[in-house]
Amino acid sequence: MVGQPSAAQPAPDRLVMMIVSDTDADTLQQRLVAGRYPVTKVGSTGGFLRRGSVTIFSGVSQAQVADVIAIVEDVCHARREFVPVQTLPFIGDGAFTTEPVEVRVGGAIVFVLPVERYERF
């Protein structure tokens, strides 16, 4: 039947939206696919350092959410990097040092949303 999942693939009742660093995105996508979770990847930019980020969507059952989040936690680690102060997006009075500044990069932001309606054509 159109729009209905197969018996082996129940209709997702949760949408997991993961915003991750583009350096972690390919590994995360591979791990999710290996775990047989559906994946849609959308490139984006933004954030404090205006670096590349990726938004990955996965429609899963409520029972699968914890497993998906565990994969994200395993792959997407926050880390510290030193960046030139000139690349930071704030305006100062010239009192800033010219030394690189340590900033937090990587990690992930995860949203879990209820799915009101699911259709597959």
Image (tube, helix red, strand yellow):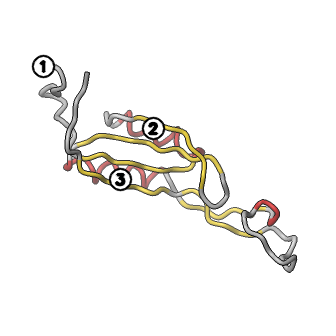
Mark 3 and mark 1 lie on one chain; the one further toward the N terminus is: 1
Q: Is label 3 or label 1 in front? A: 1
Amino acid type, callout 3? Ile
Q: Is label 1 or label 2 in front? A: 1
The residue at which mark 2 appears reads as: 29
* Residue 19, percent from left and from top: 48, 50
Residue lying at 26% horizontally and 42% vertically, measured from the top left: 60
Check whether the beta carbons of the residues at disc 1 and disc 2 lie within 8 A of each other. Answer: no
| Closer to us: 69 or 2 | 2
Residue 1: give its label: 1
Amino acid type, callout 1? Met
Q: Quadrant of residue 47?
A: bottom right
The residue at which mark 3 appears reads as: 69
Mark 1 and mark 2 lie on one chain; the one further toward the N terminus is: 1
For the residues labelled 3 and 1, the Cα–Cα distance comes to 31 Å
Q: Tell me the quadrant of the picture where the N terminus can be found.
A: top left
Tag 3, which secondary structure? helix
